[in-house]
Amino acid sequence: MHAMLPLLRPSDFPPLKRRSISTLQVNLGYRCNQSCLHCHVNAGPKRKEQMDDDTLALVLKTLADCGIGTLDVTGGAPELHPGFRHLVQEATQLGVHVMDRCNLTILDEPGQQGLAEFLARHRVEIIASLPCYLRENVDQQRGKGVYSRSIQGLRQLNALGYGQPETGLQLNLVYNPIGDHLPPSQCALEADYRRELKQRFGIVFNQLYTITNMPIARFGSTLVSHGKLESYMQLLRQSMQAANLDNVMCRDLVSVDYRGYLYDCDFNQMLDLPLGGQQSRRHLRELPALLRNAPPIEIADHCYGCTAGQGSSCGGSLTT
């Protein structure tokens, strides 16, 4: 796979400063039961990296000590980590809102019995990957049979009350483009998802998030191999909207890798571009001090992906 950071720096992307930290996004490891083309984490079944018990305990201590209100748990498939349920349970007891970035097919994996019920019991917000409402598009991007298993997972979550407005159990879906183009309007696409999933399967959900494919990791390497990186970067640059700069996720979020090291966002983590720069790698234990004197946000050309068009973040588009 191609090394992407040298192709993305230096950059003329505008400098950014952090406002505060309301969300701690924690990557529990890169093991996943899927291996998707667009995956910026390069996750898959053969990845072995995972967070150790001491770092898991430090995550909980940091949430309590720093008064951070949201824990965003990601991977890989974070549910494959043996400490996932303990982390969720302890965080919710602290009064922290927990978000689980779930690929849906994990719900019927061997060893995951009762996972959906556990998530509902602890009122975990689910951010579920479903790159299209059509079978052929999903199976093309994520593997044969993934669409059927994803629909099964959504039905299971609906049966527990997820996606039903009166329950407060949040079920949000995520769309990624299949190729090297920007997502369509989030509002228009959400309407399509609602109509098609309801008519075909009786499925309901709360929101749809559209996320731009980042020119990093597996997707970035594919662009390089096909000679499309330059044209894709030109698309991102030409589509930049300066108004999106105020709402990019790195202003209010810190990303933590499985070793406990800090990054300005999940994308920087995958580029190995640490918070504070590569010469001063910072650890989670240092976060309380960093809250008082945060270094500038590390940038590279992939940041144009967050500000192109309607904008893109872990919470979907930045403008409506």
Image: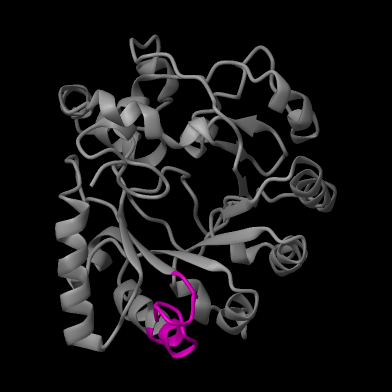
Q: Which of the 4 image quarters holds residue 308? A: top left
Q: Position of residue 103 (x, y in %)?
A: 44, 65
Q: Position of residue 267 (x, y in %)?
A: 46, 35
Residue at image coords 39%, 79%: 154
Residue at image coords 50%, 30%: 251
Q: Quadrant of the N terminus?
A: top left
Determine if the magenta segment contains residue 157.
Answer: yes
Q: Is residue 284 left or right of residue 117?
A: right
Decide whether the magenta segment is chiefly helix, strand or loop.
loop
Q: Is residue 88 left or right of residue 319?
A: right
Give the magenta part as a residue range: 155-170
| Picture mark count | 0
Q: Position of residue 75 (x, y in %)?
A: 56, 53
Q: Position of residue 165 (x, y in %)?
A: 39, 78
Residue 62's place in the image compared with 127, above or below, is above
Determine if the magenta segment contains residue 176.
Answer: no
Q: Is residue 75 left or right of residue 146?
A: right
Residue found farthest to the front: 166
Q: Which of the 4 image quarters holds residue 220? A: top left
Q: Which of the 4 image quarters holds residue 233? A: top left
Q: How is the image coloured?
A: one colour
Front-most of residues 300 and 221: 300
Residue 285's place in the image compared with 280, above or below, is below
